[in-house]
Image (cartoon, coloured by chain):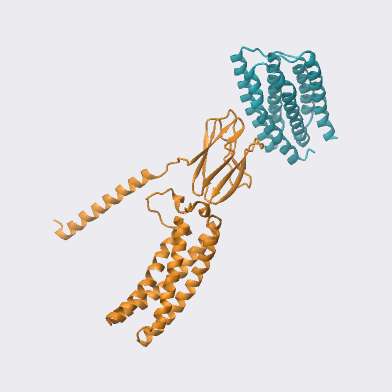
Chain colours: A orange, B cyan
Amino acid sequence: MRPPQLQAHIYILAAVAAVLSAVGVRAQDAQPGGTANHIVIIRQVHFNPPQMTVKAGETVEWKNEDIFSHTVTADDGSFDSGLIDPGNSWQRTFKQAGTIGYHCRPHPNMKAALVIQGTNETGAVANVAGRGGTLKWSPPTRPEELHPILVNFTAALLPLALLSDILGRIFRRQSFHHAAWWMVLYAAVITPFTAAAGWWWRLTEGSALPAKLIAVHEWLGSTAVVLFVILAIWRWSIHKRNTLPNWAYLTFALIVVLALVYQGSLGGRMVFGK
Amino acid sequence: MKLRKSYLWVFASAVLLAAGAVTACAQAPTDPQIAGIVQTANQIDINQAKLALKKTSNPQVKEFANQMISDHTSLEKSVNDLAKKLGVTPEDSATSKQLKQQAADETKKLVSLHGKAFDKEYASHEVAFHQTVIDAAKTTLIPNANNAELKSALEGAAPLLQGHLEHAQQLEQSLGAK
């Protein structure tokens, strides 16, 4: 006979497991399962349409309705379908923005192009949609996954530290100031990782990001790393002297928080559009 | 010299087709003769590709020859299906006979060659052959086709032949045949 408390825990775990597995099943169902967003028909030794505009992250399918075998081969050699026999088709998902010319290897006169629009043209980030909108959880390994996760900590810790210091001054409670110091420290530690993930994203998929926004975002982000370190050192000296943060510190922290809000809005604009 | 030889073939074919065109003023090819010319041209290219597969060890040449067999077999089937549908029985003509004779001469030459020399000659011949067939289609076959479906099928085959020509030119260039 299990103790009632343990039994209750088992029920809760079972319920959680059931919910998670149900979510998992639904998530599997929600996966695209190879359906293409656009179709190019190959017929009478032509790609039809000869030029197509798609959004980054979308999948294009080439259907061979000709009586001959053809290939879909990038002019720059970045992809090659191999021979697609009559009646068969081939798919590819395009993540990088840009224009790609392609041709058929056995019939070099068959030429066509794909225009892949990035965030600056579409207002929606294809990189985020890169996993097909699935709900299934998988460990973050790519910069476009790591950066938004780390940003949460950066964005939360500093404003809360400022709020905590303000509340400490209003209610004259030392515990608020202690909390503020630790939060500033954590923010200063985690923010370089946030910036590093951002730069990684920028360097790998920079062309898919809107040029103007990313230019401001990347340098403001890097500046924020330095400001966070200055703020942490300043806050540490206040903490060490066991004094209250003065107005100069609070004003400086407020400016950094406002910069952070603007930085977050730029990031949001890149992800979700205007 | 090689260049001259390959273009000699084009020249001979051009003379033949020009002669055909001149004769055409008096006697244009009939639909059965046009079907016969297309069938002959298909068969010539398939046979020479089969010979290439036997003789070459170059993967590019093999790939090209396999493509010629596959494409021309499909084309031949569609021509035969269309001829059946239209009730046209392909007939021999002076042009088709001349094409066969030239192909026999070229095959003799190809059989006598080996290795790189074979590959270069095969690629050069494929360029010349496809150029000749494209010219023939444009100047003689399409204008003289009476049946609208036959005319449309010939027009539809033009991009395929152009594709083969460009592929053969790429092959020729990569083999340094020129």
In this rendering, the answer to whether B54 lies above or below A213 is: above
Residue B125 image point, x, y percent? 76, 30
Between residue B30 and residue A12, name the one nearer to us. B30
Residue found 76% across the figure and 16% down from its top: B97
Q: Which of the two residues, B134 or A204, is positioned nearer the viewer here?
A: B134
Say which of B22 and B90 sits in front: B22
Say whether residue B99 is left or right of residue A144: right
Residue depicted at 67% across the width and 16% down the height: B146
| Location of residue A183 by image quarter | bottom left
Expressed as whole percent of the image width and height from the top left, the position of residue A251 reads 41, 79
Q: Quadrant of the N terminus of chain A?
A: bottom left
The number of callouts visible is 0
- The answer to whether residue A238 is left or right of residue B137 is left
Horizontal side of residue B176 vs B147, given as left or right: right
Which residue sits furthest front? A274
Q: Position of residue A265 (x, y in %)?
A: 44, 63
Residue A81 x %, y %? 57, 40
- B170 lies above or below A262: above
Which residue reaches farthest right?
B1
Quarter holding residue B164 = top right
**Residue at point 34%, 78% (across, down):** A165
Image vertical order of residue B97 relative to residue A191, above or below: above
Question: Could one spot residue A26 in this view of the protein?
Answer: yes
User: Quick check: can you spot residue A141?
Assistant: no
Residue A249 vs B48, above or below: the answer is: below
